[in-house]
Image (cartoon, coloured by chain):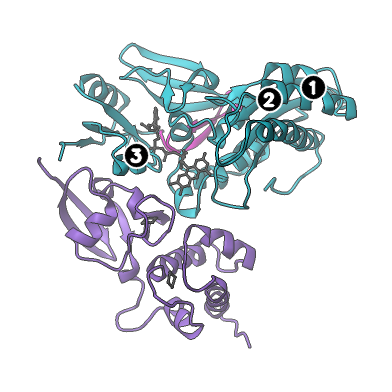
Chain colours: A cyan, B purple
Amino acid sequence: MSSLSYAAPTSVDDAVKLLAGASGVAKVLSGGTDLLVQLRSGRLKPELIVDTKKIPGIIGIREENGGFVIGAATPGAVVEAHPGLNAAWPGLVEALDLIGSTQVQGRCSLAGNLCNASPAADSVPALFAAGATAVVVGSKGKREVPVEQIPTGPGRTSLAKDEFIVEFRLPPRPARSGDAYLRFIPRTEMDIAVVGCGISVTLDANGVCTAARVALGAVSPTVILVPAAADVLIGHKLDADTLAKLDAAAQAAAKPISDKRGTVEYRTKIAGVLARRTAAIAFDRANGIKNGKAH
Amino acid sequence: MAKTYVSATINGESSEFLCETQQTLLDVLRDVVGLTGSKEGCASGDCGACSVIMDGRLVCSCLVLGVEAEGKTITTIEGIAQGDHLHPIQQKFLEHAALQCGFCTPGLIVATKALLDENPNPTETEARYWLAGNLCRCTGYDKVIRAVMDVAAEMRGETVG
Ligand SMILES: Cc1cc2nc3c(=O)[nH]c(=O)nc-3n(C[C@H](O)[C@H](O)[C@H](O)COP(=O)(O)OP(=O)(O)OC[C@H]3O[C@@H](n4cnc5c(N)ncnc54)[C@H](O)[C@@H]3O)c2cc1C
Ligand code: FES
Ligand code: FES
């Protein structure tokens, strides 16, 4: 049996030193709901696990400069119980809440979902749509990175060996803004997305879209931002013509693979349908129309 | 390799153990501490047979490292009964025949305890979603849900006919 060490540093500096000093593979641990499964299957053979959860601030939510800051390892259950986040970013909260069971929600984090870098990760399209940034720390200091620059391929990220995410920053929310995330799965609970879509919009007083971000999951090697789909929304109300263009733009951006969950043709079509449905919820929310949960 | 010394509160008692990093909390509970009530159905977070309450949160003990238990308060199925008296949840599972082989039962009872601690008055839909991470091959879930709704009412002091 290979030897595996564990450390639970109580400061960012100590964590970075441990990561930088490891001779073999070192893995950061948040909720462990991906990492422990990979350890058990033997897919991953690290020599060191650095548990971040004792670092002050890495679990928790605070408001700063008119926006929210979410600690990297904050469990889904904590995010879901936060009234301010539910009011400002219901789509992001629902996306994270879709992950796994009650048991998984007690542990799963945004950082783990993003850095596990699955193309089907549920919270990631919502994070991309929100325009969130990740605060990354490492030996060279601190940098703030748009979340869409973190995943680079299935299971791969742009983070250096000695880097990890300490928190996510969500921008201040202008009036008449709304977000939504929908995933398509063949059952109602506990499944992996065939396609996921996150959309965030801001409208003017007449209901015309002034800003939009659209992201798709499970149709590409990573979650993708789709600027062409955002462009068809900006300057328009969500009428039939806009919806048709949005559908077409989402389909054009989708470059899925065929697997047991769906064929290329099926996933491409669903990407368009899901984009329309997600946009409808995001626009409703921006217009002050309250929806129930999107799932 | 060197083992890590861990001290935690398990079922109200302080507990100390040595464990290797790759041992899960479930491994430690079963093989080191000797609490074999928590079951391993899948070891991948899918079945819930290993459910425990850690610092007030329901988790799969197969997805927690033993070393992460340092300083934590943990409730396992062995900590649910009050001495020789079954907890009302256990009693209602028996009355409603909410188990057959019983392999899923420790996890379901711990998960039900966590549900009622947080929400004493769940709707049936809320109870079903809460328990969606606890798989049962035998009962078809309906008897489980009847037991959960009945015990919730009883614990609220309501009697159901
Ligand atoms: C039963 C079950 C159901 C699931 N269902 C879903 C689902 O429906 N949708 C979905 O998207 N996912 C699902 N997952 C996968 C998993 O729960 C999520 O990806 C979760 O968000 C991972 O978060 P974590 O904190 O547990 O990550 P961990 O397991 O702790 O970490 C995951 C990866 O991210 C890295 N990492 C962790 N924290 C940081 C950090 N701060 N900085 C840099 N890297 C970091 C780790 O090194 C590791 O490579 C499921 C898992 C299980 C077991
Ligand atoms: S053994 Fe832990 S969830 Fe199945
Ligand atoms: S009673 Fe047999 S698995 Fe549930």
Residue A113 point in image, percent of width and height = 47, 34
Q: Is A163 left, or right, of B127 in this rendering? A: left
Is the C-beta of the residue carrying label 3 under 8 Å from the nearest atom of ligand 1?
yes
**Spatial separation of the CA atoms under disc 1 and disc 3:** 40 Å
Residue A115, image quadrant = top left
Q: Chain of mark 1?
A: A
| Range drawn in magenta | A58-74
Is the C-beta of the residue carrying label 2 under 8 Å from the nearest atom of ligand 1?
no
Q: Are marks 2 and 3 on the same chain?
A: yes
Q: Please tell me whether residue B126 is drawn above or below residue A217 in the rendered image.
A: below
Circles 2 and 1: CB distance less than 8 Å?
yes
Upstream in sequence: badge 1 or badge 3 = 3
Q: Please tell me whether residue A14 is drawn above or below residue B119 in the rendered image.
A: above
* Numbered circle sitting on residue A214: 2
Q: Please tell me whether residue A106 is drawn above or below residue A70 in the rendered image.
A: below
Residue at position x 27%, y 27% in the image: A26
**Spatial separation of the CA atoms under disc 2 and disc 1:** 9 Å
Residue under label 3 = A38
**Spatial separation of the CA atoms under disc 2 and disc 3:** 31 Å
For ligand 2, which image quadrant applies? Answer: bottom left
Q: Magenta includes A186?
A: no
Q: Callout 2, which amino acid?
A: Val
* Numbered circle sitting on residue A233: 1
Residue A41, image quadrant = top left
Residue mark closest to the camera, 1 vs 3: 3
